[in-house]
Image: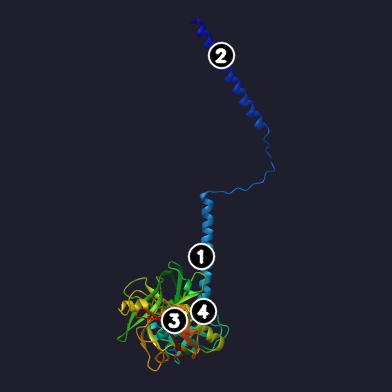
């Protein structure tokens, strides 16, 4: 028994000695390792503060710069926004202290340095009409050189030089939620060149218009919640870099924050033609048509296909001499697919009377290819 106790005591002592030796070795190795570390005063490094105050000040600075950029952009665009009236006043300028109801005041935007003004046809009147355009407090007598009442767009020419004009965006690239600004002359002098902001609320909208006991539809509109009031008609809707994406046309009077603009792409060929040649020779298919969704709403077609629905063929027009029929759905023109009536308009505006176009038509669930020689339009 005593022998066993002595043996266990010796074992404990040996284990303790081994533990002390092992601990000493570990401590020695740590000492050697840290002793060899070289701390240099010349070490180069970068540090970044992450305090809330620093980040906040940078954010404020960025917001301030962005706000200044937007303000500068809007100032530049506003210089190209004009007042338009069918009447003039003894004082010359239509942008004086007279109500818009008395003057029929509307808005336009300069699209060339030599005096072409883009607006709504309901603001300027039909082709060959006379209207009065005020640019930077100077009023010019303008002549309407092109007008499309169905599209509600017009171009007026004034005798001006070195005028500041706007740039166009590609309205096909618009996205819902994109920031936009509407500029116009609501109500009268006190509120001329008013800027309102909002977003693109929806695209390719169709609205029903009741005027003079006649019902019509305006298709492919840009919907925005930027405030549009009477007098804003014909003014530009611009994006965040100051490019015109549309021309303001109407608003829903029974609701707030629902206004509409005509996409700028549809009128680009017309504007470019006037800028290059001082003229525009309109070509036409000689049809009345609806977007496919309008035709569907009117129970004129089913949901199976998209395109342009032919509601009427004009007597003695270009299409009347072809195999095209009322009720046909034009799905493409010269292999360019059509989704909206503005797709068709934009393509035809790039053609000339006498050009032959090839239409792909859906009739009774069958596809047909029909050629039509374009005629001369009256717009």
Characterize the local packing of mark 4: few (<14), some (14-19) or many (20 or more) Cα atoms within 10 angstroms. Answer: many
What residue is pinned by disc 2?
A: 13
Q: On residue 87, which mark appears? A: none
Image spot of residue 144 (x, y percent): 47, 89
- Measure the alpha-carbon separation of dots 2 and 3: 101 Å
- Residue nearest the observer in this picture, 63 or 320: 320
Characterize the local packing of mark 3: few (<14), some (14-19) or many (20 or more) Cα atoms within 10 angstroms. Answer: many
- The answer to whether residue 366 is left or right of residue 1 is left
Between discs 4 and 1, the one toward the N terminus: 1
Image spot of residue 102 (x, y percent): 38, 85
- Labelled pair 3, 1 in contact (Cβ < 8 Å): no
Characterize the local packing of mark 1: few (<14), some (14-19) or many (20 or more) Cα atoms within 10 angstroms. Answer: few
Image spot of residue 103 (x, y percent): 40, 86
Between discs 3 and 4, the one toward the N terminus: 4
Secondary structure beneath label 3: helix
What residue is pinned by disc 1?
A: 67
Camera-near label (3 vs 4) is: 3
Between discs 3 and 1, the one toward the N terminus: 1
Relative vertical location of residue 25 with respect to residue 124 in this rendering, above or below: above
């Amino acid at each position: 028994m005593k022998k066993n106790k002595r043996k266990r005591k010796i074992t404990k002592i040996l284990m303790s000695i081994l533990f002390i030796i092992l601990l000493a070795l570990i401590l020695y190795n740590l000492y050697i390792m840290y002793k060899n570390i070289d701390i240099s005063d010349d070490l180069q490094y970068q540090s970044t503060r992450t305090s809330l105050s620093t980040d906040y000040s940078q954010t404020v600075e960025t917001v301030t710069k962005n706000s200044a950029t937007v303000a500068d952009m809007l100032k530049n665009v506003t210089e190209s926004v004009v007042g338009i009236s069918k009447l003039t006043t003894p004082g010359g300028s239509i942008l004086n202290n007279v109500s818009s109801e008395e003057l029929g005041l509307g808005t336009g935007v300069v699209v060339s340095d030599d005096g072409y003004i883009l607006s709504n046809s309901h603001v300027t009147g039909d082709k060959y009409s006379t209207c009065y355009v005020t640019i930077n407090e100077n009023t010019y007598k303008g002549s309407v050189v092109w007008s499309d009442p169905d599209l509600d767009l017009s171009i007026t020419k004034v005798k001006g030089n070195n005028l500041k004009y706007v740039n166009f965006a590609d309205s096909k690239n618009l996205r819902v939620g994109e920031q936009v600004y509407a500029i116009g002359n609501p109500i009268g002098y006190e509120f001329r060149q008013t800027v309102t902001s909002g977003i693109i609320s929806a695209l390719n909208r169709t609205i029903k218009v009741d005027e003079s006991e006649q019902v019509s539809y305006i298709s492919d509109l840009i919907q925005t919640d930027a405030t549009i009031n009477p007098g804003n008609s014909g003014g530009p809707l611009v994006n965040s870099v100051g490019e015109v994406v549309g021309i303001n046309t109407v608003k829903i009077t029974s609701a707030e924050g629902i206004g509409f603009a005509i996409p700028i792409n549809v009128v680009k060929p017309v504007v470019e033609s006037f800028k290059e040649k001082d003229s525009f020779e309109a070509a036409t298919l000689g049809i009345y048509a609806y977007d496919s969704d309008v035709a569907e709403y009117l129970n004129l077609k089913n949901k199976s296909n998209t395109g342009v629905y032919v509601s009427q063929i004009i007597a003695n027009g270009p299409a009347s001499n072809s195999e095209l029929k009322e009720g046909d759905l034009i799905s493409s023109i010269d292999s360019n697919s059509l989704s909206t009536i503005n797709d068709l308009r934009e393509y035809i505006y790039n053609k000339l009377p006498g050009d032959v176009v090839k239409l792909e038509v859906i009739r009774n669930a069958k596809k047909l290819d029909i050629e039509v020689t374009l005629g001369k339009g009256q717009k």
